[in-house]
Amino acid sequence: MPDIEVRQQEDERLEISIRDHRFSIAPPTESGDGDVSPMELLVASLGACMELKAAHFLRRSGITGAVTVVCEFSMSEKYPDHIASLHFVVKVPEGIPTGRREAVVRVVRTCAVHNPLHNTHHASVSVRDDEGSEHSEDMRDKLLASTND
């Protein structure tokens, strides 16, 4: 996979580069106005992956029509930098049998963006200065510990 680069611009604005695509984000203002936040991008990525999986599954099952995923999240009051809850509603075309709806839930839970939140075997972060000095830590242990708080 190609690298994704996130670079600070003026103020708190960030430029994100993914292959040949460039876009910028910034944290929302105190009033909640402003650009898309990193948390919103994460939740939107989960929703987009779920939509793609659900639509593909339904097409393979011979069911046509639009699939929409509505994504909701809330931030923790105890830990303001943590997402406290996520909720996704997968809207499917009318008339889908109950068994197919249950299967859609199972399918969307296997999306490639959702899986790393639970199944990543290796995640690390390194801090490297311009001279090449580096410090690294395994994030997986930290992620598991934070879920037990």
Image (spheres, rainbow, N blue to C red):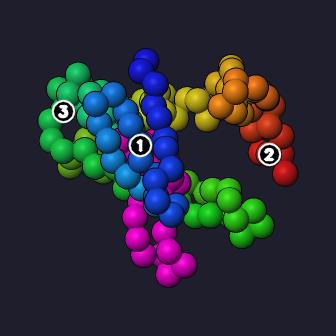
Task: First in sequence, mark 1 or 3: give its number.
Answer: 1
- State how far apart marks 3 and 2 are (Cα): 41 Å
Give the residue type at disc 2. Answer: Ser
Q: Nearer the viewer, mark 2 or mark 1?
A: 1
Label 2, residues with CA under 10 Å away: few <14, some 14-19, many ≥20: few
Disc assigned to residue 4: none
Which region of the structure is painted magenta? 27-48
Callout 3–callout 2 Cβ contact below 8 Å: no
Q: Amino acid at mark 3?
A: Ile
Which residue in the rendered view is the most extreme toward the front? 131
Q: Alpha-carbon neighbours of circle 3 within 10 Å: few (<14), some, or many (≥20)?
A: some
Q: Which residue is mark 2?
A: 146
- Left or right, residue 54 beside residue 102: left
Q: Element at badge 2?
A: helix
Which numbered circle lies on residue 63?
3
Mark 1–mark 3 Cα distance, whole angstroms, equals: 36 Å
Residue name at image x 69 percent, y 33 percent: 129
Foreground mark, 3 or 2?
Answer: 2
Q: Residue at x 28, y 30 (%)?
A: 20
Point out the frontmost of discs 1 and 3: 1
**Left or right position of 3 against 81:** left
**Mark 1 lies on residue:** 16
Which secondary structure lies at badge 3? loop
